[in-house]
Image (cartoon, rainbow, N blue to C red):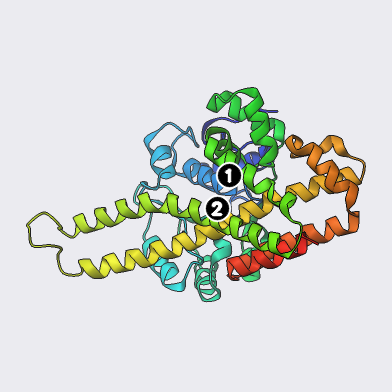
């Protein structure tokens, strides 16, 4: 496996994408129009493949005088959102609304301030509302001079057809377990045993693998989640399991949000003069605080749903392993630590029932993505899994 350099160093297993991006950047240096470069790109790939990382690396390379060295001021500022010509749009809500896109279009209509490119990275293009997507379409149809749009989404089908037809598509793949384990060992100093475990159970999601490997509480929570299928003996146990799952997701989201919310509120109050004159905040401060609290509530709702989605994916790997045993491929288990339990479940159920359960989990994930009530959705799922 080739060693990736500079801004592309973290794109594990994506050599085919890196090669395309390097050629595109190089083609912009000649001053001639070529087929290598486009004003709009869409990066797709499964969770953890690094689609957002690839887009940001491309943005860094475009504004870097050395084609993406990763160490200069331009590269560093582009990565952390401080570069004047690079916009990184990350939504922490459930959707990207038209007002946000209109505000963005106003900002990016200016010429690049540092003479290179003005680059917009939209990490969650699949969360655009229909009206927001149509507003974005107009900008992509009539691109500004030296403006590049980099959109990220799980699949092409998550992007409006009229938008994706005007973008160059790059498909990222899930990196291998071995590649992720190597990164954890060499870059993060994780022990080989822990690195292999985290890479295996995260299924190639390098961010989640790193999070698992470094946090014992996260590993303990996952262990609790993975044992829920073993508790399903009837309707009452199904409801109890659903409540446990929702409580775990809510607790994680609340813990993560509380410290962040408090700091954001304090910083905003300080910006409006609280404590500076002894007279309280300036005009508009209370309204701004209320708007921030509304955004924080929306963000926490998404965090709970994201936590549930990750938990359901973990449970899906349990039934995937059951199916592998039933198919005679027990050497390819994801959850090797639960091999005895998986074998026991595989022995007393039929393969067609296992497939139905996996499909039910995927349907529940889809419903959660469509803003279905979390507890009701998970309760209905657990009743299916308990059969």
The answer to which quarter of the image holds residue 216 is: top right
Give the CA distance from mark 1 to mark 2: 8 Å
Residue 161, by quadrant, is bottom right
Residue 106, x across and y down, in percent:
37, 67
Q: Secondary structure at mark 2?
A: helix
Q: Which mark is residue 248?
A: 2
Q: Is residue 193 left or right of residue 122?
A: right
Disc 2: CA contacts within 10 A as few (<14), some (14-19) or many (>=20)? many
Residue 290 appears left or right of 255 = left
Report the label total: 2
Q: Image point 56% across, 30% down: which residue?
A: 5
Which one is earlier in the sequence, the residue at label 1 or at label 2? Answer: 1
Of residues 357 and 151, the one nearer the viewer is: 357
> Measuring 71% from the left and 35% from the top, which residue is drawn there?
177
Q: Is residue 3 visible?
A: no
Q: Position of residue 299 (x, y in %)?
A: 45, 60
Please tell me the numbered disc located at residue 211. Answer: none
- 114 is higher (above) or lower (below) than 291: above
Q: How far across and how far down the image is residue 116, in percent?
A: 42, 47
Q: Is residue 160 visible?
A: yes
State the residue lying farthest toward the bottom. 131
In terms of secondary structure, where does tag 1 sit? helix
Q: Are marks 1 and 2 in contact (CB under 8 Å)?
A: yes
* Pointer 1 residue: 221
């Amino acid at each position: 496996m080739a060693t990736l350099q500079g801004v592309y160093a973290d794109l594990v297993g994506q050599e085919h994408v890196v090669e395309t991006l390097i050629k595109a950047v190089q083609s912009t240096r000649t001053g001639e129009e070529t087929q290598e470069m486009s004003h709009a790109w869409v990066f797709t790939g499964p969770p953890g493949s690094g689609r957002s990382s690839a887009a940001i690396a491309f943005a860094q390379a475009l504004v870097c005088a050395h084609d993406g060295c990763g160490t200069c001021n331009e590269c560093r500022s582009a990565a952390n959102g401080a570069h004047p010509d690079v916009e990184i749009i990350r939504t922490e809500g459930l959707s990207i609304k038209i007002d946000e896109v209109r505000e963005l279009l106003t900002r990016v209509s200016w010429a690049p301030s540092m003479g290179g490119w003005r680059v917009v990275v939209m990490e969650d293009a699949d969360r655009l509302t229909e009206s927001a997507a149509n507003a974005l379409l107009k900008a992509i149809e009539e691109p500004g001079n030296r403006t590049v749009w980099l959109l990220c989404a799980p699949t092409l089908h998550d992007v409006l057809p009229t938008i994706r037809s005007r973008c160059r598509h790059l498909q990222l793949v899930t990196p291998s377990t071995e590649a992720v384990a190597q990164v954890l060992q060499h870059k993060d100093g994780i022990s080989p045993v822990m690195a292999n475990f985290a890479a295996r159970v995260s299924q190639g999601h390098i961010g989640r693998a790193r999070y698992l490997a470094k946090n014992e509480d996260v590993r303990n929570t996952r262990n609790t989640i993975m044992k829920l299928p073993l508790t399903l003996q009837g309707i009452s146990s199904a409801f109890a399991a659903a409540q446990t799952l929702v409580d775990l997701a809510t607790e994680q989201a609340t813990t993560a949000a509380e410290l962040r919310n408090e700091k954001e509120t304090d910083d905003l109050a300080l910006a409006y003069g609280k404590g500076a004159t002894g007279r309280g905040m300036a005009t508009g401060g209370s309204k701004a605080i209320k708007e921030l609290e509304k955004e924080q509530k929306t963000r926490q709702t998404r965090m709970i749903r994201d936590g549930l989605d990750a938990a359901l994916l973990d449970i899906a790997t349990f039934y995937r392993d059951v199916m592998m045993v039933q198919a005679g491929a027990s050497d390819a288990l994801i959850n090797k630590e639960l091999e005895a339990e998986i074998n026991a479940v595989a022995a007393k159920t039929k393969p067609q029932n296992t497939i139905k359960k996996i499909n039910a989990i995927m349907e529940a994930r889809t419903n959660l993505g469509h803003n279905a009530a979390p507890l009701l959705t998970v309760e209905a799922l657990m009743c299916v899994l308990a059969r």
